[in-house]
């Protein structure tokens, strides 16, 4: 079964390291606005949550793409954008329910988490272990289902 | 099927174009009007190659030539070099202000020419915009008039009724010939003004109403939230935070 990035917000300190790692890995620049993962901090209640692509099965980005440039990587299970096919119409950036696809005007590409080809760097360098890359075992699957239930209101459909 | 490209024998699927076969095998053929999203159009003629079948030999556009026989292809001969140089020489003079055409012009050494550049123009008629619009399902623009008058436009140059204001045409245009302007709450493209839908939370423009309708028609979700990309992230985090309170 595909491995996936699992977020445990109770461990996240809101340090934004993942954003820097992500942008540096993909753009060779420490620039959170070009990162595919974003930490949302709620300082008053002491809560932080890294938002990133959920690699949905029936993905909105894939559904709205007019040219079929979004497809699932058979090895990593990541939904990937084929840059040379992409028209840059940016419909997917409007359609994503969690806002996890973004247009990068510097590189002129639509960027989203591609699980770093199966070796996610944000997971490697997260100092508190709030993001992990796990195979979906029975226990992690139930965890995923629990977190999926939390997303019920965000997503229209939960697989 | 076995064909020969530049003296190199290669194995190809019957039915694919010469251009695809060449690129699959690491042989570069220059193109201006080809895009992976919709393939070749045979418009720009930059991809001309020489095809030898038995004893006869002819020049074809490789992007629209499907391989059905065991042919021999040459991608760079003096005749092809001359064709490409002429195409670039003419197109550069149509779009002298574009960085894109200037780069091509420098790549293809040009002989002295009496032609003067058209400083007003920047479109090279590659039709990438027309194809992109077609892919979006809008087909709001097309090539209008013929010959030297040919240009890209909307029917009767009126405000494009079929346009959804997505700007895919302006994005794909290699020479920046399509003007799309955005003010506080309006986007103008192809003689048409679109009212921009704003994020309900931060007020940032999300897109045109027609774009949102397009997404809804394709089965995209969560649009009722009326939020911009950044606020949708925040919303997701807020929802999760409620479970941890």
Image: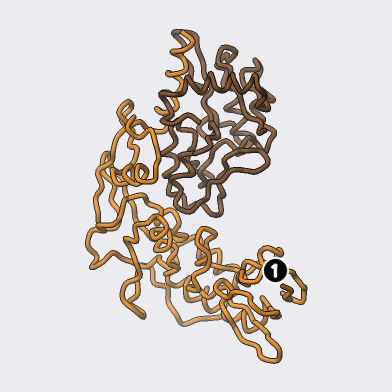
Chain colours: A brown, B orange
Q: Nearer the viewer, residue B82 or B240?
A: B240
Is residue A154 shown to the viewer in this render?
yes
Residue at coordinates 50% horizontally, 81% vertically from top-left?
B113
Quarter residue B121 falls in:
bottom left
Q: Nearer the viewer, residue A113 or A43?
A: A113
Dot 1: element: loop
Residue at coordinates 60% horizontally, 68% vertically from top-left?
B30
Task: Estimate the x, y position of residue B137 in percent, counting from the top left.
Answer: 37, 56
Task: Estimate the x, y position of residue A100 in percent, counting from the top left.
Answer: 49, 33
Quarter residue A119 falls in:
top right
Looking at this view, name the residue that lies furthest to the bottom. Answer: B55
The residue beneath circle 1 is B12
> Is the N terminus of chain B in the top left, top right, bottom left or bottom right quadrant?
bottom right
Task: Estimate the x, y position of residue A105 in percent, counting from the top left.
Answer: 48, 43
Task: Estimate the x, y position of residue B15 in percent, counting from the top left.
Answer: 61, 71
Q: Is residue A10 above or below residue B11?
A: above
Q: How many marks?
A: 1
Quarter residue A74 falls in:
top right
Q: Is residue B163 above or below residue A144?
A: below
Residue at coordinates 67% horizontally, 24% vertically from top-left?
A137
Is residue B110 shown to the viewer in this render?
no
Q: Is residue B194 above or below residue B123?
A: above
Q: Chain of mark 1?
A: B
Looking at the image, residue B39 sits to the left or right of residue B94; the answer is right
The crowding category of the residue bearing disc 1, from other C-alpha atoms within 10 Å (few below 14, some 14 to 19, many at least 20), is many
């Amino acid at each position: 079964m595909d491995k996936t990035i699992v977020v445990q917000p109770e461990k996240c300190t809101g340090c934004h390291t993942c954003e820097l790692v992500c942008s540096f890995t993909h753009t060779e620049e420490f620039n959170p606005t070009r990162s595919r993962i974003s930490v949302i901090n709620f300082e008053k209640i002491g809560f932080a949550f890294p938002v990133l692509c959920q690699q949905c099965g029936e993905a909105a980005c894939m559904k709205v793409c007019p040219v079929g440039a979004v497809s699932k990587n058979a090895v990593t299970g990541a939904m990937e954008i084929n840059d040379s096919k992409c028209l840059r119409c940016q419909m997917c950036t409007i359609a994503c329910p969690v806002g996890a696809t973004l247009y990068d005007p510097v590189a002129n590409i639509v960027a989203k988490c591609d699980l770093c080809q199966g070796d996610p760097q944000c997971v490697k360098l997260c100092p508190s272990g709030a993001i992990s890359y796990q195979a979906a075992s029975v226990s992690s699957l139930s965890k995923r289902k629990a977190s999926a239930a939390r997303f019920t209101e965000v997503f229209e459909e939960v697989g | 099927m076995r064909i020969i490209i530049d003296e190199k024998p290669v194995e190809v699927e019957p039915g694919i174009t010469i251009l695809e076969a060449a690129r699959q095998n690491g042989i570069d053929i220059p193109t201006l009007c080809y895009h992976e999203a919709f393939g070749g159009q045979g418009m720009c003629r930059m991809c001309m190659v020489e095809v030898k079948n038995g004893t006869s030999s002819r020049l074809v556009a490789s992007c629209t030539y499907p391989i059905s026989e065991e042919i021999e292809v040459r991608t760079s001969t003096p005749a092809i070099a001359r064709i490409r140089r002429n195409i670039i020489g003419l197109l550069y003079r149509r779009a002298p202000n574009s960085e894109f055409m200037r780069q091509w012009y420098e790549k293809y050494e040009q002989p002295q020419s009496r032609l003067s550049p058209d400083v007003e123009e920047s479109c090279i008629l590659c039709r990438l915009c027309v194809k992109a619009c077609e892919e979006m399902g809008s087909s709001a623009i097309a090539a209008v008039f013929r010959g030297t008058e040919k240009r890209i436009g909307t029917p009767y140059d009126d405000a494009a009724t079929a346009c959804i204001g997505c700007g895919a045409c302006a994005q794909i245009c290699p020479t920046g010939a399509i003007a799309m302007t955005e003010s506080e709450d309006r986007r103008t493209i192809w003689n048409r003004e679109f009212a921009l839908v704003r994020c309900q939370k931060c007020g940032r423009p999300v897109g045109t109403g027609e774009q949102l309708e397009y997404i809804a028609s394709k089965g995209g979700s969560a649009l009722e939230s009326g939020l911009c990309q950044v606020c949708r992230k925040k919303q997701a985090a807020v929802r999760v935070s409620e479970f941890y309170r």
